[in-house]
Amino acid sequence: MPPEATPAAELAALRYEATAIRRLILKTLNKSQAGHPGGSLSAVEILTALYFRVMRIDPDQPNWPERDRLVLSKGHAAPVYYATLARRGYFPEAELSTHDTLNSRLQGHPDMRKTPGVDMSSGSLGQGLSVAIGIALGAKMARHNYRVFCLLGDGECQEGQVWEAAMSAPAFGLDNLTAIVDWNRLQLMAKIADVMPTLSFAGLWREMGWEVVEVDGHDLEALICAFEAPRTPGKPRVVLAHTVKGKGVSFMQDRVEWHAKPISKEELERALGELASGGAQ
């Protein structure tokens, strides 16, 4: 049976959170003059849906053993992770101003030893899915029923370790694992298709034994349906989320140069103005 539709009032509240998270990302990156705006803005709705609706968590008990876990494999998108955790109550929003500074808990890549709510330190691309599989397999072996989510970048999926991991998850019957690919089609220096094209991205996952769901990665209701749909016994699920890099800011959208670039004061004011008026389409 498909999940029930998300009530309109809840969707409106989630959209409000998504805009608030975008604002925090931009302010954080302007303050630190470092970080990755493009891939952070593309993943806003994915993390909003997970942390404000789907995942079973308790910000007052960040190490609660039965919580659902998230592995941010695309660790350079830490700004969206931190902004989401702050909005969800894991630490004060004011702490975001320390991003990527000495002695801060909020380093350029997430550190599970320091930051409340971070389930796995990450940063080196291509490794997160392997870790998520280990956590999901551990849950099965220990008879815990929590779920494990793993957010990957599409450029990251050029790493060979991703596919070694992808082959193993169906073999272990990990139906408690959901991988999500932020499919914004751009990477550090160019379009994905110009660097290392794949003939059938969805087909590769499907042929390895994954349940494949494709959605608009900025459609909160579609994401929630993809995450909350009844699981197929023994099959891991991958949600291929079609997104736009730099989503919400006109001069950043679908622009490769905003993969990693400081935001000036003037650019910040322009971006916040666009978000206040409803955001770029």
Image: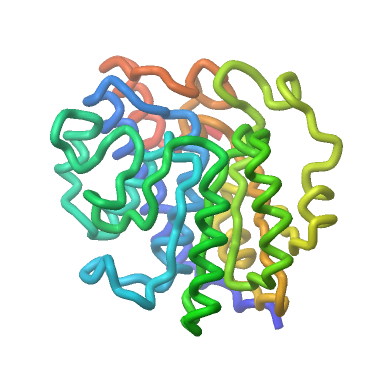
Residue in the foreground of this view, choosing between 242 and 56: 56
Report the number of numbered marks.
0
From the top left corner, tell me how far across and down residue 194 is, in percent: 74, 19
Q: For this view, does 266 lie left or right of residue 137?
A: left
Image quarter where the C terminus lies is top right
> Does residue 114 lie above or below 145 as drawn?
above
Image quarter where the N terminus lies is bottom right
Residue in the foreground of this view, choosing between 21 and 152: 152
Q: Residue at x 39, y 53 (%)?
A: 120
Quadrant of residue 99 within the rendered picture: top left
Residue in the foreground of this view, choosing between 5 and 144: 144
From the top left corner, tell me how far across and down residue 17 is, in percent: 36, 53
Q: For this view, does 128 lie left or right of residue 265?
A: right
Q: Residue at x 62, y 60 (%)?
A: 222
The answer to whether residue 109 shows anywhere in this view is yes
Q: Residue at x 72, y 59 (%)?
A: 213
> Does residue 56 lie above or below 265 as drawn?
below
Q: Residue at x 67, y 38 (%)?
A: 160
